[in-house]
Amino acid sequence: MECENSSGAHVVCHGAHNGGGIGQKLQDEAPYGCIEALPAGEVAQVGSKECHVTQPSCRHPRGGLGDCSGVPLDAHYFTSWPDQASDQHGDITNAGADVEHALPGAYARVTEQPFRERLDQRGLACQALVLTIRGTEEVRRLQIRHGFRSRRKIPPLIGGYSMSKVVRVHEHGGPEVLRIEELEVSRPGPGEVRVRMEAIGLNRSEAAFRAGLYPVKPKLPTPIGYEASGIIEALGDGVQGFAVGDRVCVLPTFRLGEYGVYAEKAVVPARSILPAPRNLTPIEAASIWMQYLTALAIIEVAHATLGDYVIIRAASSSVGLAAIQLANWAGAVPIAATRRGTKSRALLELGAKHVIATEESDLVAEVMKITGNKGARIVFDPVGGPYVDTLAQAMAQDGVLFIYGGLSGQPTMHPHWQAAFKNLSIRGWVASTIWNYPDRFARAQDLILRGLADGHLKPVIAKTFPLKDIVEAHRYLESNQQVGKVIVTV
């Protein structure tokens, strides 16, 4: 039924009002003012009953719903205590326990920031005590004005929260475990920025992370994703060189699960953003850094140059195509290795000088034919597994074999005799080998941006999906159908 309380707020109530349901002690200690801002359209719990809020409302200390429409609707505000509260009521050590009893997962903490200025600007009496709900399965945080102490401590809450659709993983598994949730995204802390995403670049490492097969094991539920483009909408303390409204790229320079860009909005470290190149679309800007920083191994370490032959396995991936472009720019000869010949034409059109379908032909014989029996000096392989021995057989004397992934899911054995007789260098590689070293990272940025500006480098987009289709996007990512980068648009 629709009902109206003493303050004139209209709600649709299923049952009678019988208490605020946030813990009797907190109700007793908060004798006046707003308890909770309730946006229109929400289902509000009033005691054991549910009410559908038809206009912005405010829960009062004794359980009624009143008008508090000026309160920002992206947070829940509680009334302040009188200034003498701490003297009058003493040390309320059970405050946190009472909140936990009423709202499982809540925490209480003293703060010196009463939020008075922010709320007074809106002409409200409500101030000082704030509850922010970060989703039904996230920890609720309660911030109490000075004078009260909790047995648990959490980082202080600063305000500036914003609602966002966020993709999280609650259990390991296939693409179907990716769950879209409506969560509050916090104001960025020191050294952080909040970015409104425009496009998200998908990476195979994220699929492995989702499936529980990545070296870094997340604490579930976990955010996911670490490459994107977007627009800065908030800056944390100490962030310099950027402004609200700047278009940026988010680089994968943090650990998966530490932050997550599969979202409409996300907080990321300021050290992980760079200005988006002006000559690229948001979709292209979301695709560039992981692929080119990874593929730079053939330039930065192997020093690919004129006359070199470079075998690029999984050549139709975004990193494979980046390696083809870099090899061509260096004057080397890229040999694309792909499982079947269905992608041969596309790979040749995208710059491969030769294509070998490894399930349909003899890679070693083909490479020796192409190179005049010299073999390839550089091999760039994200797959690993037993086939590494075949790759070693196709290599030239003093060659360099990079293994930068384990897509095969099988053990990778060291090709001892091939390595010994040819004096091969067989090494791992990850892109952090570049960004963990400032001089090398600066050099790589300059090279990539110059290549993009001059046309030597051009990101290839295989397919785009809207954020709501993130599950299908991951299925496509793991299907191996793509030629180029898979992008999710926001």
Image (tube, rainbow, N blue to C red):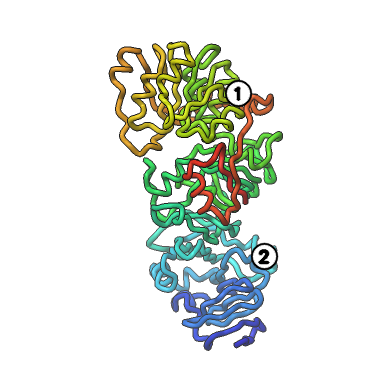
Nearer the observer, 73 or 451: 451
Which residue shows up at 43% across the image and 49% down it?
210
Residue extending farthest to the front is 360
Q: What's the residue type where badge 2 is placed?
A: Asp
Q: Which mark is residue 120?
A: 2
Left or right of 361 on screen, residue 351: right
Please name whichever residue, 301 or 259, is drawn nearer the observer in this view of the structure.
Answer: 301
Front: mark 2 or 1? 1
Asked if residue 437 can be seen in this view, the reply is no
| Image position of 26 with respect to 490: above or below | below
Please report the residue visible at 62 percent of the width from the left and 51 percent of the height from the top.
Answer: 490
Q: Does any portion of residue 362 appear in the rendered image? A: yes
Q: Is residue 475 left or right of residue 287?
A: left
Q: Secondary structure at mark 1?
A: helix
Say above or below: 51 vs 370: below
Q: Image point 33% across, 30% down: which residue? A: 386
Toward which corner of the image does residue 362 lie, by quadrant?
A: top left
Quick one: label 1, few (<14), some, or many (20+) residues within 10 Å? some
Q: Nearer the viewer, residue 258 or 71?
A: 258
Q: Which kind of residue does numbered mark 1 sit on?
A: Leu
Q: Secondary structure at mark 2?
A: helix
- Please state the horizontal and vertical placement of residue 222, each as a whole percent of the image: 44, 52
Classed neighbour count for the residue bearing mark 2: other residues with Cα under 10 Å, few (<14), some (14–19), many (≥20) = few
The quadrant where residue 214 appears: top left
Question: Which residue, given by chain and number where applicable, does mark 1 sit on?
Answer: 447
Q: Quadrant of the N terminus?
A: bottom right
Task: Give whichever of 330, 252 is nearer the camera.
Answer: 330
**Which mark sits nearer the N-terminus, 2 or 1?**
2
